[in-house]
Image (tube, rainbow, N blue to C red):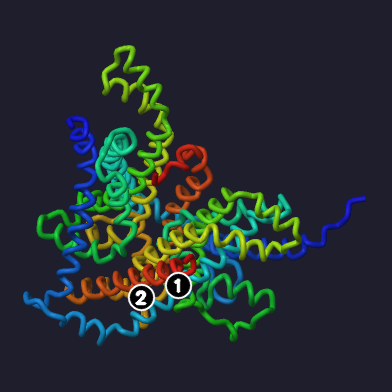
Amino acid sequence: MQKRLIAIALVLPALIMIVLFFIVPLFASVVGAFDVGGVLGLGNFTKSFELYSGDMIFTVVIVTVSTALIGLLSIAIGGYLTLGENPRAVAILRWLYRWPMFIPFIVVGQVMRTFLAKNGLMNNILVSLGLLTPLQTIGFLDWRGIVIAFVWKQTPFVTLLVAGAMASLDRSTIEAARNLGASRLRILIEIVLPQIATTLMVGLILSFVTMMSVLSVPLMINAQSPTMLTADIAFRINAHGDYGVANALGLISLILTAGAALIYLRHSVKERS
Amino acid sequence: MARVDLWWLPRALILGLLAFIIFGPLTNLVLWTVAEKWYFPHMLPLEYGFSFWQRVFAPRGNAMGSLLTSITIAILTVIASLALAIPAGYALSRLKLPFRGLILLAFLIPQAFPNLPVYVNIARFFYQIGLNGTIAGVVMVHVTHGLVYAVWIATAAFSAVDTDLEEAARSIGAGPFRAFRDVTLPLAAPGLMASAIFVFLESLDEFTGTYFVGAPDVTTLPLLLYTAGSGGNYQIASITALLLLVPSIGFMLVVERFLRADVLSKVGH
């Protein structure tokens, strides 16, 4: 009994930290969303939908498209790392893919802003190669810029998880299928993918949540309307000191995130049964 | 005679394209840090030089101040996180705890919910108690966010240490604290080092929490980068970005040395 108390005492300070500085403010944000000038009400939500329903759709579309692209790319890279037959190409890919993983979002925002701009290095190279004329260049600093920045930064993380899970699979079924003449693409889709689906799902949900709460990338790449909900929340606070609508928008993004996780969970449960 | 492998053609094409997608933007950043004059439609800068570096590192420049603030905050965050995570990690790996799985999950919460609304409300709360715009306030926010790495990796690091060694020390008369300090702690040190580096980088790179809780009094490098970038000063912003980039990439290259497979396989268990 005493030992148990010691164990609890050792964990408690760290737990209190989480409760005090995360769970309590999270509840404050949920309560604050219904606080209209001191009375409980839905005023903040009507205002949020009036002003920002376009941005809600914009946010969901951007994050969903990014998540789908991240999923496809990480399966492709992880698949090649596991099933690739040329050791040198596999080694190069393994060295190459993880570079953006630890680069902070704020740096990704700055890097992409200068690279993808109408007069950025990407267009400059295309013009110098004669693929475009200066008049044909277009900037990518809108929803496409945000998607590119998200996919660039998050794919290595999901790939790391997916490739790790693929590497620890039992090779014998893969070898057996290979001996029976199955193509590598078919092995990837029919044998490897079903076994690593849980890992992929965890990685994609974590990425989804991360992208829903990144402020720097939308602020730096595309701050004008339509933009992402995070930028709207920052604007409500900084320009209007309007905590009610900011909290309502926060709760809406929370619900959107939970909804995405739920849809995926139900889908994967259905597939397994 | 060696046969030419025709598959190298598509392979090289795809790997080359991937290398361009990954390194193109990074090269662009490095070019911006040394570009004195660069305008459309020139592919490369017209003049190179280090005058912006001098400006950033001038004694009057605010970059040195931000760098110092960033490093101070990151070091304090690491100390506080480890002080909380080492006892917690030890208890989670060695002692009998009720609801152990739930406790481990609780540390994941700050990563599993969109944290912008949380920062907004912490800022409001800190404002009332006078912690807004202070280094202590920013450190608390960073610790909360970094605890998941600190606690999870510390738990895994302690789990990877053989209990027999600790019991041997106890049987020749060492007290529980002495056995921990002289046997378990040194053996878990590489894993704890990895968690310290993780927390340090998280703190160094953190933008959103600092933006709400610290600004405008506490200016870290990410905030300086943001202000310089929105002011259109791409050279200063790129130099700041490069300063943030170097430790991140350095860590990526050495992470496997600190985080050995036996520790990694125990993370989250």
Amino acid type of the residue tagged 1 in the rendering: Ile
B166 left or right of B5?
left
Mark 2 residue crowding within 10 angstroms, few (<14) / some (14–19) / many (20+): many
Q: Is residue B167 left or right of residue A202?
A: left
Mark linked to residue A228: 2
Where residue A63 appears, x then y in whole percent? Answer: 42, 72
Residue A112 circle label: none
Farthest right residue in view: B1
Image coordinates of residue B147 in percent, x first then y, are 31, 47
Q: Amino acid at mark 2?
A: Met
**Residue at x 29%, y 62% (from the top left corner):** B115
Label 2: chain?
A
Which quadrant holds the C terminus of chain B? top left
Residue B140 visible in the current orientation: yes
Vertical position of residue A104 compared to residue A12: above or below: below
Measuring from the top left, give residue A273's x and y in whole percent.
Answer: 47, 66
In front here: A138 or B208?
Answer: B208
**Between B202 and A176, the one nearer to me in the picture:** A176
Q: Left of B142 or right of it: where is B236?
A: right
Q: In screen coordinates, is A271 left or right of B146?
A: right
Q: Chain of mark 1?
A: A
Discs 2, 1 touching: Cβ within 8 Å: yes
How many other residues sit within 10 Å of disc 1, few (<14), some (14-19) or many (≥20)? many
Residue at 60% over, 49% down: A170
- Residue bearing mark 1: A146
